[in-house]
Image (cartoon, grey):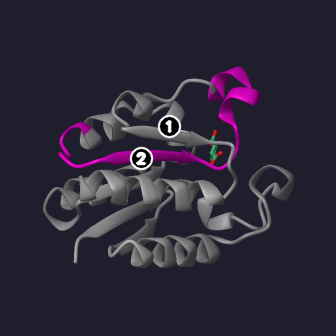
Amino acid sequence: MQTILVLNGPNLNLLGQREPAIYGSETLADVEALCAETAKADGFAVTCRQSNREYELIDWIQAARVEAAAIVINPGAFSHTSIAILDALGAFEGPVIEVHISNIHRREAFRHHSYVSSRADAVIAGAGVQGYAFAVQRAARLLAG
Ligand code: DHK
């Protein structure tokens, strides 16, 4: 069974507690369960990881070159700052789906640009945590050809 790597960046460990008016009341555990359930329905497995550290996300993206068929990533604030994460994703050959829980285009100007988007095969923003389910479904569809 092929694996979809689901990566969450900084502060997403606080989902459900952090600014619920923006990010909702569901927890990271809820999101990871949703991804696993969605992937299973399409015949895929997921590996879910979260880190507040840029280097750790980069190491997991590099490992995905041999361990995963697709990546679903919410880079958190690193979306807006990290050329290093963009470069790591550039070295990954499978589909990359970028997720933002909030609609970053309706928020502060500094959130409007994401470095990751230039590598992403699809970008989902503003769908709440349901965006992760859409992202996993899209990755599964791209992998199924
Ligand atoms: C999550 C974050 O932590 C922010 O830094 C981004 C993103 C938006 C989200 O909507 O999931 O700007």
132 versus 88 height, above or below? below
Marks 1 and 2, the one that precedes in the sequence: 1
| SS category of the residue bearing label 2 | strand
Residue 12's image quarter? Answer: bottom right
Nearer the observer, 128 or 52: 128
For this view, does 37 lie left or right of residue 5?
right
Name the residue located 19 percent from the left edge and 67 percent from the top edge. 67
Name the residue located 33 percent from the left edge and 33 percent from the top edge. 119
The residue type indicated by label 2 comes to Ile
Labelled disc at residue 79 = 1
Q: For mark 2, does the 10 Å Cα neighbourhood hold few (<14), some (14 to 19), or many (20 or more) residues? A: many
Residue range corresponding to the magenta coloring: 90-111
Q: Magenta span has 91?
A: yes
Q: Are marks 1 and 2 in contact (CB under 8 Å)?
A: no
Q: Magenta span has 69?
A: no
The residue type indicated by label 1 comes to Ser
Q: Quadrant of the N terminus?
A: bottom left
Nearer the observer, 29 or 10: 29
On whether ligand 1 comes within 8 Å of the CB at mark 1, the answer is yes
Residue 6 placement (x, y as % from top left): 42, 63
Nearer the observer, 100 or 55: 100
Q: Residue beneath label 2, please?
A: 97
Q: For residue 106, say whether it is visible.
A: yes
Name the residue located 47 percent from the left edge and 61 percent from the top edge. 51
Name the residue located 59 percent from the left edge and 54 percent from the top edge. 131
